Image: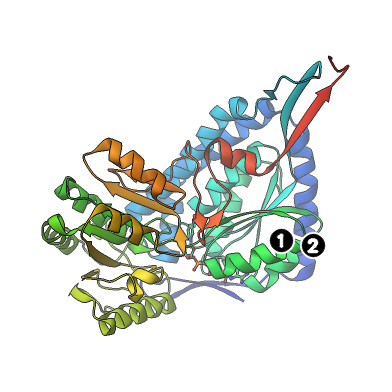
Amino acid sequence: MITSFNPATGETLATFESHDDAHLDKTLAQADRAQKQWAALSLSERLPYLLAVAKTLRRNKEALARLITLEMGKPLSEAIGEVEKCAWNFEYYAQSAPQLLDDLVIPSAATDSRVVYDPLGLILAVMPWNYPFWQVMRAAAPVLVSGNGLVLKHASNVPQCALALEDVFKEAGLPAGLFSTVLVGAAKVPALIKDPRIAAVTFTGSTPAGRDIAATAAHALKKQVLELGGSDPFIVLADADVQTAATVAVKARFQNTGQSCIAAKRFIVDAAVADQFVEAFCDITRQLVVGDPLLATSTQGSMARLNLRDELHAQVQASVREGARLLMGGNPIAGPGAFYEPTVFDHVLPSMTVAREETFGPAAAILRVHNTEEAIRIANDSPFGLGAAVWTQDIDLGHRLAHQIQAGAVFINGMVASDPRLPFGGSKASGYGRELGMLGLHEFTNIKTVWRGPART
Ligand code: NAP
């Protein structure tokens, strides 16, 4: 049984029978047939379907956003932004795929030699609940435009979003089954990966689950892209525009109620400006309004599940015991919902729990450092390597530091964010492979060399 519940109220919204093996078999068979028909279309025949998906998303954005908010608790305005971004991603690939998938001609001894990008087949997407539309659609647009099909196993706490996504593709007129949702728990994932009709897997979620998926996919010799956890550093150097950095920092930490892989989690601040940064950061954090995520006045909603709030609270309590200075928050908010106070720690050391582990909720850790070298050393002293931000007015220095930081993306004087045009992904325990942009599009293609003779001597 899969249960949809509202984390802001604790109320059960709907229950669904998990799909049994016979249902899964039927779904995969239909998806397999649909993918083969889809791959037989030319690229220019596929593009209008992508635009139809974008239109469907925009047409239904209020209803879809409401579903997101009801199932995982983010403020409605953020949920609307999420649906709009999904539409943008489909528009971006509809417009740019002809160029990005164009043959790459490479001179050689052949009369003609080139690289072509063919579809792989059916891609299994195992996805998390934190951006229940965006995580799926950022993978779906490039997967589909290159001629693949997609089978979605979504997180078990967002079954209505999972089914609504399937409906978007139906309403947009794509071949039945080309995008299919299966309602199953994590235990069914290994069997899905091993199924011969599945060609590859894209996974977004926690690092431990990524390890399991990678092991199964490796054994089956199937390609995988892993987008895993993060503990992004947000470095503020002594010459930074501190007020702007603090304003962006609060958004970077508390957006999506702190439940983002690329949320800034460790604020590494030069001691010369640390007092000023901390004061501004706390002032802005105090303005957050925690409340019913359906209300326009709420800027922070509830966390997605009570057990996730418990995990965050245990990390907060451990950090207090370890000597981190709690400046605000630090407690669950009473009531049936999974609300948590916006929490700020100062004088955090790299060995403390809030700096060492990924905190997936509204808790900020501020670490004070004496110089730029120490800032970079601490930034890299993490098993994760997803995103990073550096604030400095010395642009040359910012670019030099970008090379030294171990991350899939470094944003200079800005907040780490995904953009359909730019590749997105991690290093170290944050995963491998890329999504979005040209590189994300090529991940799920067979990059094939075509050689035509006679050879020229
Ligand atoms: P999660 O527990 O790993 O779950 C993600 C998905 O994997 C769900 O569909 C889940 O199914 C399934 N799953 C869980 N354990 C599995 C296993 N051992 N084998 C196969 N599948 C498994 O992650 P989450 O708590 O939903 O999401 C939060 C995590 O995702 C954070 O670590 C966050 O940083 C990361 N994340 C990364 C990115 C990125 O782009 N790098 C983006 C967003 C989130 P059930 O729900 O049925 O258990």
Which of the two residues, 217 or 131, is positioned nearer the viewer here? 217
Q: Residue at x 38, y 71 (%)?
A: 356
- List the residue tagged with mark 2: 25
Three-letter code, disc 1: Ala
Q: Earlier in the sequence, mark 1 or mark 2?
A: 2
**Label 1 neighbour load within 10 Å: few <14, some 14-19, many 20+:** some
Of the residues tagged 1 and 2, which is closer to the observer?
Answer: 1
Q: Residue at x 78, y 52 (%)?
A: 30
The label shown at residue 226 is: none
Three-letter code, disc 2: Asp
Distance between the Cα atoms at labels 1 and 2? Answer: 19 Å
Residue 257 shows up from this direction: yes
Which of the two residues, 52 or 254, is positioned nearer the viewer here? 254
Q: Quadrant of ligand 1?
A: bottom right
**Label 2 neighbour load within 10 Å: few <14, some 14-19, many 20+:** some
Q: Is residue 311 above or below residue 282?
A: below
